[in-house]
Amino acid sequence: MWAAAKRTARFAVTAKWQLATLKWRLILLGIAALVLFLVILVVGILDTLTGVQNEQPTDVTFDTAGGLQVSDQVLQYRGLVESELTKHGLTEQTNLVLALMMQESGGRGNDPMQASESKCGRIGCITSPEESIVHGVEHFASVFERANRDVKLTLQSYNFGGGFIDYVQENGGRYSKELAISFSQMMYQRVKHTGIYRCHRPSAVQHGACYGDIEYVDSVLKYFAPVAVADGVITKELLSGLRSPLAIPLNVTSRFGWRVVFGQRDNHTGIDFSCTPSDTIHAVKSGTVIYSGNRGPYGNLVQVRHDNYITAYAHLSRLGVKSGQQIEAGQALGYCGTTGRSSGNHLHFEIKTGEWSGHIDPAPVFGF
């Protein structure tokens, strides 16, 4: 009996100690949670104050007299674009709309502002440039006001649709590339079953963001000189003196920008030149080969870094250089071909600031 009493007493003491220990642990855990809450609260307040201090005006006016790098096909519509913008009190945004038009169509076709989808929900319902500009400018003005005159948000929403403005407002209220990517990912999941939407850029493939063009803002703003993006700067001076990539006269078969291929919109990130399998492809400038191999839709691809930009040569039948190799202007890189996603022998040529981003229209460099 005495032994049983001792065991009972020891059990009672142990239980009391464990209860006291648990009590103190709960108290310490509560204190830690309170401290963490206070830290998060203070950081949130500081972040909000910093955000207010760093907030920049969103009504950006592009004063680019003499610095707008667009085609003559686009410039022929300056008067009409300016006239339509004046009706909306946005005359100062003329150059921005012309740059947008350059990205959409290069000024070609009956719908240079690619405004059919915003007007009637399908491609091809607009049948004249005048109708395209009238409706396109009206749509631009509407988006511009809804976006609180945030130029980048306006441009991306012109491409994505007005739903992107609501999405941004729900996620901080300011445009960012990250929001463009996440919106595209979300929308693509909703519509990919239709088979209409495809990834047009390697960066879109990388992120699974195949709805619209996640690079649209940089693509439009690159038409202002100097062209500045995150990866570097391209100016007219840097691009001067480039040699021809072919020894034969250059014949353009497909231009830079949005086009319709097999009934679907496709963003062409370079320019295509006709050639035959016997034609050698040459480097337009001295530099370093940063890629030589097969790259999906590009087929056999060579990319060369020069100064602050990169040139790319795609669909080659054979490769004549290796990654890391130093090359001279005019040096052979390979032969014309039709590898990758290609319907015939041609050279797909690109100029860009990043390995898979920052594309600009090569046409003006070669006088087209």
Image (cartoon, grey):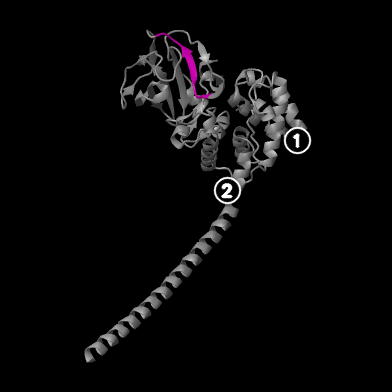
Tell me, for residue 89, which label it has, or none.
1
| Residue 237 location (% of width, % of height) | 50, 25
Q: Which residue is most to the bottom? A: 2
User: Would residue 275 be counted in the magenta stretch?
Assistant: yes
Please say if 80 is above or below 187: above
Mark 2 residue crowding within 10 angstroms, few (<14) / some (14–19) / many (20+): few
Please say if 150 is above or below 282: below
Foreground residue among 95 and 278: 278
Name the amino acid, label 2: Asn
User: Would residue 105 be counted in the magenta stretch?
Assistant: no
Q: Viewed as shown, does residue 162 lie left or right of 316?
A: right
Q: Which residue is mark 2?
A: 171
Foreground residue among 242 and 39: 39
Please say if 162 is above or below 347: below
Range shown magenta:
267-276
| Residue 285 location (% of width, % of height) | 41, 20
Q: Which residue is at 61% across, 28% downward?
A: 99
Can residue 242 be seen? Answer: no
Q: Viewed as shown, does residue 310 lie left or right of 324?
A: right
Q: Which residue is at 48% across, 16% downward?
A: 272
Name the amino acid, label 1: Gly
